[in-house]
């Protein structure tokens, strides 16, 4: 006697924020009545989820997304499949997001700092003193955009001879490439008030993809009648990726300058198209 094929069909869901925006890269994990995982599917950029075909039966669907409160549903999958419909995932705790719209970086209340290893056992810290930029806070927040420009010759490490060397073709080559530029058009939530910001960084006319670990510090009114928001971000860069290949060796074969540079950004932004004038 031939065995009848087992009925199987997919489970679908639409992951949304409370205000109706998609939650990209959320995950639906499906378990059977014994608690065993039988399927796992990730949402696309529009928040849509489709699992692999499942045998007919009753399941628990657990819906998670970084930075959002999880949800769980019981669902019966029949021969024609099943849907969780719209699953609303509120942000997990944290602070209210900054208002949608344009924001301007305030360089007087921000910092761009870099740290490099020196001689293999100590660190040299520097900072750029001239920079600026704009951001557009979007809804959904993942579609926010940032464009920032740093004046390359504004590097300062507290040592004039070293700073002059950093401005030469051995490092930043500021005579030919006077600015450092960063653009990003995408955020991915990684936790409460925390995102990965993916973008492109241009140094020495070379553009490379860069991911920043971004933390949102909150927003509120300032003493001048405006609204400000704070952000902290870090990343690590490889010097060779940007043709900064100066690698003078000292005794025992130790490089004078480390191969990677740590970047730390403390950014305060003002809501609006322009910085306030006082």
Image (cartoon, rainbow, N blue to C red):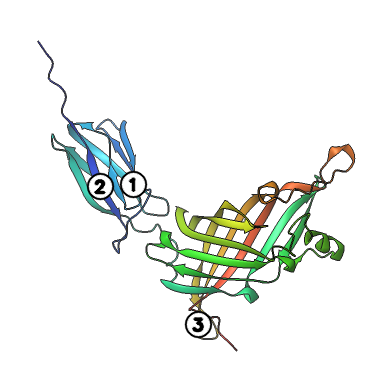
Mark pair 1, 3: CA separation: 38 Å
Q: Residue furthest bottom?
A: 278
Which quarter of the rendered picture does the N terminus lie within?
A: top left
Identify the disc placed on residue 13: 2
Quadrant assignment, res 171 = bottom right
Residue at numbered disc 3: 226
Name which residue lies at 72% across and 55% down.
115
Residue 213 position within the rendered picture, expressed as x and y whole percent measured from the top left: 55, 54
Disc 3 residue crowd, few under 14, some 14–19, many 20+, Cα 10 Å: few
Residue 270 position within the rendered picture, expressed as x and y whole percent measured from the top left: 52, 76
Which quarter of the rendered picture does the C terminus lie within?
A: bottom right
Disc 2 residue crowd, few under 14, some 14–19, many 20+, Cα 10 Å: many
Residue at numbered disc 1: 43
- Badge 3 or badge 2: first in the primary sequence: 2
Mark pair 3, 2: CA separation: 41 Å
Residue 178 can be seen, yes or no: yes
- Badge 1 or badge 2: first in the primary sequence: 2
Residue 192 can be seen, yes or no: no
Residue situated in front as seen by the camera: 111 or 174: 174
Q: Residue furthest top?
A: 1
- Secondary structure beneath disc 2? strand
Q: Is residue 90 left or right of residue 74?
A: right
Q: Is residue 123 left or right of residue 262?
A: right
Q: Is residue 201 above or below residue 79?
A: below
Residue 31 position within the rendered picture, expressed as x and y whole percent measured from the top left: 29, 35
Residue 6 position within the rendered picture, expressed as x and y whole percent measured from the top left: 16, 24
Name which residue lies at 54% across and 61% down.
183
- Secondary structure beneath disc 3? loop
């Amino acid at each position: 006697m031939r065995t009848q094929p087992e009925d199987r069909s997919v489970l679908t869901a639409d992951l949304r924020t409370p205000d109706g925006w998609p939650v990209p890269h959320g995950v639906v994990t499906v378990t059977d009545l014994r608690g065993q995982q039988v399927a796992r599917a990730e949402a696309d950029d529009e928040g849509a989820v489709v699992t692999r075909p499942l045998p007919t039966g009753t399941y628990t669907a657990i819906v998670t997304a970084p930075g959002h409160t999880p949800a769980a549903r019981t669902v019966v999958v029949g021969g024609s499949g099943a849907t969780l419909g719209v699953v609303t995932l509120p942000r997990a705790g944290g602070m209210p997001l900054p208002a949608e719209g344009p924001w301007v970086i305030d360089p007087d209340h921000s910092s761009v700092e870099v740290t490099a290893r020196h001689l293999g056992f100590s660190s040299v810290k520097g900072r750029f003193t001239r920079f600026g930029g704009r951001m557009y806070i979007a809804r959904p927040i993942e579609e926010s955009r940032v464009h920032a420009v740093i004046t390359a010759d504004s590097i300062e490490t507290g040592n004039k001879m070293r700073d002059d060397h950093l401005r030469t073709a051995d490092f930043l080559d500021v005579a030919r490439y006077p600015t450092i530029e960063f653009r990003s058009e995408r955020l991915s939530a990684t936790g409460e008030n925390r995102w990965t910001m993916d973008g492109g960084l241009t140094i020495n006319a070379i553009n490379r993809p860069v991911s920043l670990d971004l933390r949102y510090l909150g927003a509120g009114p300032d003493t001048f009648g405006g609204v400000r928001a704070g952000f902290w971000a870090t990343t690590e860069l490889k010097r060779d990726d940007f043709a900064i290949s100066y690698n003078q060796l000292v005794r025992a074969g130790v490089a004078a300058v480390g191969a990677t540079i740590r970047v730390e950004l403390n950014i305060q932004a003002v809501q609006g198209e322009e910085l306030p004038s006082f």
